[in-house]
Image (cartoon, grey):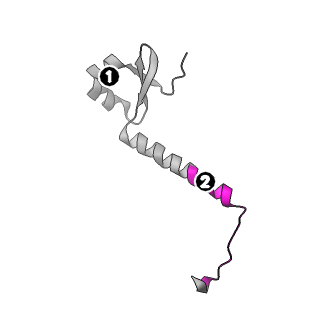
Amino acid sequence: MDTLLASITVSVTELKRNYANILKEMENTPVAVLNHNRPEAYLLSADYYEMLIARMEDLEDAKLVRERASGPFVDVALNAL
């Protein structure tokens, strides 16, 4: 069985019939779209998607900081800047 990564699920048919209502009810929670009782896609609000992208960028930045923390470093005098 496939793992569902959302607490709300809808069928493809239900999504076609009630798209506007589903968007209103989902708020900032992902919705798993099921096709034959298997996850076919995930529906995300724009706010939730933007939050996920921002979080991924933060994680990528943190990874770079960890990778570069041990050097090599370049010595530069402040008055040379």
In magenta stretch: residue 73: yes
Pointer 2 residue = 62
User: From the viewer's perspective, is 60 left or right of 24?
Assistant: right
Which segment is the magenta one? 60-78
In magenta stretch: residue 49: no
Of the 4 image quadrants, the one containing the C terminus is bottom right
Per the image, label 1 sits on a secondary structure element best described as helix
Where residue 33 appears, x then y in whole percent?
A: 40, 23
Pointer 1 residue = 15
Q: For the point 71% across and 64% down, which residue is it?
A: 71
Q: Neighbour class for label 1 at 10 Å: few (<14), some, many (≥20)?
A: some
Q: For the point 60% across and 86% down, which residue is it?
A: 79
Q: Amino acid at mark 1?
A: Leu
User: From the viewer's perspective, is 62 left or right of 55?
Assistant: right
From this view, report whether residue 78 is shown above or below residue 71: below
Identify the residue at the far top of this view.
Answer: 36
Q: Earlier in the sequence, mark 2 or mark 1?
A: 1
Q: Neighbour class for label 2 at 10 Å: few (<14), some, many (≥20)?
A: few
Q: For the point 28% across and 21% down, which residue is it?
A: 16
Q: Amino acid at mark 2?
A: Ala
Where residue 45 appears, x then y in whole percent?
A: 37, 37
Of the 4 image quadrants, the one containing the N terminus is top right
From this view, report whether residue 59 is shown above or below residue 5: below
Using the numbered discs, state the Cα–Cα distance from disc 2 to disc 1 in whole angstroms: 38 Å
Q: For the point 54% across and 19% down, which residue is it?
A: 2
User: From the viewer's perspective, is 64 left or right of 6?
Assistant: right
Where residue 29 appears, x then y in whole percent?
A: 43, 33
User: In this view of the protein, which residue sits in the foreground, 30 or 40?
Assistant: 40
